[in-house]
Amino acid sequence: MTSAQRPVSRRPRRQLPASAGAPRRRASNSARPSFRASDCAQPKTRRSATSCSFQEDVGLQGITDGEFRRTYFHIDFLEQLAGVETKGGIAVSFHSAQGNVDFAPPVMHVTGPVRHVKPIQVDDFNFLKSVTQRTPKVTIPSPTMLHFRGGRDAISRDAYPDLEAFYADVAAAYRAEIAALGAAGCRYLQLDDTNLAYLCDEKMRDGARQRGDDPDELPRRYARLINAAIAESAGGHDGLRSPVPRQFQERLGRRRRLRAGRRSAVQRARRRRLLPRIRRRALRRFRAAAARAARTRPSCSGSSRPSSASSSRRTI
C-alpha cells in the first residue's frame, strides 16, 4: 500500500469532564468587582480574561490569569517591597528551535530594611476573581529570590549586619502580603521557587560558593524562610491554608529521623554504597532516553513557532 493509499489515522478527541461542556453560569454584575473600561481595553488584560475562559472550558478548577501583565515573574512583585532595588543580572542561557537565547535577568539588591508597605497582588487577584466562577489561583515569587541570585553582597551590611534579621524581615513582609490576600478572599496561593531547582545544577552551585554560600546548606535555610513566611497562613487568614500542615511536616520529619536511627551500621554502609550507584544508573537511563528523543525528533527548521526570546514575560 502506498503512502497515498494508506488510510489517515485520526487522533481520538480528548475527553472532557461533563461540566466542561455545560454552559458556564455568569454571576450578576452586583456580585463582581467593578473595573474601569480602560482596564479591559488593555491587550494584556484581555489576554488574561481569554486565558481564564479557556481554562474553564477544559474543566480546570484552579484558574490563573497567566501573569500576562508581568515582565518578570518575580521582579514586578519584589521591587514593590520597601528597601528592594534591581541591579545587574545573573547570566543564563536557553536553547530553542532558533538557537541559543542568552540574557541576564536583573538581580534584586536590598538597600534598606525590607518592609511590606502596601498590598501587591490584591488588585490582580480582584481582577481574576471578577472573570472566573472557579477558584482564582495567585502566584507570587518565593522569598528566597531576595537572597540567592545576589548572595550576601546584594544585601546591605548597614541595614543587615546579621542575615538572620534579614530573613526575619522578609518573612514578616510575606506574612503581611499573604494576610492581605486572605482578607481579599484568596484561597489558593502558590509560591514560585526556581532557586531550589537551580541548586541541582553544578554551575549554579559553584556560583553560590563564589558568593560565599554553602549550596548544601541553602535548601535547609530556605525551607526555614518559606515556613516562616507562611507560618500564619496555616492558622487561618480567612480560610487560606498551607498545602502541607506544619503538624504533618513535623510528624513526617520525626518518622524519618526515627527510621534513620534504627538502621544498623551494616545497613548504613550498604545505603552509602547503593545510593551513588542508583543515581548513576538513573542518569545513564535519562541520557539514553534523551539521545533517543533527539534522534527521533522531527526537524524544526520550518517551524513558525515564535522564539522564546520574543516573549514579553520572562520566567527566569
Image (cartoon, rainbow, N blue to C red):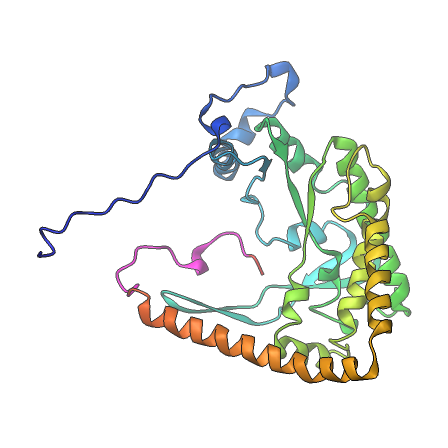
Could you tell whether 156 is left or right of 66 in the image? right
Q: In the rendering, at what x and y percent does residue 191 appear?
A: 70, 51
**Does the magenta run of residues contain 304?**
yes
Which span of residues is magenta-colored?
299-314
Q: In the rendering, at what x and y percent does residue 104 appear?
A: 57, 68
Q: Residue 198, located in which quarter of the rendered image?
A: bottom right
Q: Residue at x 72, y 68 (%)?
A: 148
Name above or below for residue 7 compared with residue 95. above
Name the foreground residue: 38 vs 189. Answer: 189
Could you tell whether 283 is left or right of 237 in the image? left
Q: Residue at x 75, y 75 (%)?
A: 216
Observer able to see residue 132: yes
Q: Residue at x 68, y 65 (%)?
A: 196
Q: In the rendering, at what x and y percent does residue 149 appear?
A: 69, 68
Classify the position of the N terminus by image quarter: bottom left
Q: Residue 161, located in which quarter of the rendered image?
A: bottom right
